[in-house]
Image (cartoon, rainbow, N blue to C red):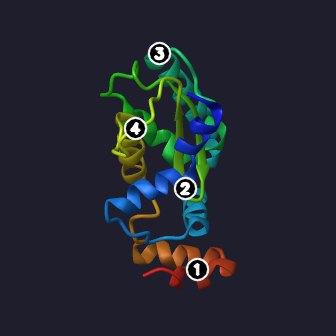
Amino acid sequence: MKPEQIARLSSAGHVQALLLACGLKQRVTPAILAAMAELLGPDSGREEILVEARQFFAERAGMIPHGLEEIPSRWLRQLPRHLENRDMGPFMITSLAFEQGLLCVAFAHEIASQTGRMTIWDDLRFVLNLALQPNIWRPLARKEEWDVWSRWPKLRRELFSLD
């Protein structure tokens, strides 16, 4: 597959289109999600979480994806749990990115759909973006809203921007 095709399929726009096409509604803005990821992420154990994620990918897939360092700690900790029961062979995840509140995943051996239907690679993107918590598809709990309200005054308006 050409680099521009890989870039398109692993983009935030593609991932968002997959989820919206299934009737999901965005409940949280990317800025709020980034703040929540920071609030909920264990900063003191960040290096340990990165080591564990690298080890998981090295053992299970034989390669460590680029971009692990950019993934919020809370998601990085959850990622192996959501991938452990999958055969990593067909996936060969080459890179991960946290963009616009979404997990963007690129695969070495991806084959684009000729019919416009979801592929097994798209299915994994879909599952991961719903499974990793917090995410933009789940509304915040009252306590989470209060945490954002009190810690990030600049984001207060965004708390009311989506229904």
Rendered position, 157 above or below 151:
below
Residue type, numbered disc 2: Gly
Q: Secondary structure at mark 2?
A: helix
- Give the Cα distance between marks 2 and 1: 20 Å
Residue type, numbered disc 3: Glu
Q: Residue 111, percent across and down?
A: 44, 29
Rendered position, 34 above or below 109:
below
Of the image marks 2 and 1, the number of the one nearer the N terminus: 2
Q: Is residue 134 visible?
A: no
Of the image marks 4 and 2, the number of the one nearer the N terminus: 2
| Relative to 70, 110 lies left or right | left
Of the image marks 4 and 1, the number of the one nearer the N terminus: 4
Q: Which residue is mark 1?
A: 158
Q: Quadrant of the N terminus?
A: top right
Depth order, front residue of 120/150? 120
Q: Are marks 1 and 3 in contact (CB under 8 Å)?
A: no
The crowding category of the residue bearing disc 4, from other C-alpha atoms within 10 Å (few below 14, some 14 to 19, many at least 20), is: few
- Res. 140 image quadrant: bottom left
Residue type, numbered disc 1: Glu
The crowding category of the residue bearing disc 1, from other C-alpha atoms within 10 Å (few below 14, some 14 to 19, many at least 20), is: some
Q: Which residue is mark 4?
A: 113
- Give the Cα distance between marks 1 and 3: 41 Å
Callout in the foreground (2, 1): 2
- Give the Cα distance between marks 4 and 1: 36 Å
Depth order, front residue of 143/101? 101
- Give the Cα distance between marks 3 and 4: 29 Å
Q: Which residue is mark 3?
A: 59
Q: Which mark is residue 13?
A: 2
Q: Residue 158, percent across and down?
A: 58, 80
Of the image marks 2 and 3, the number of the one nearer the N terminus: 2
Q: Secondary structure at mark 1?
A: helix
Q: Secondary structure at mark 3?
A: helix
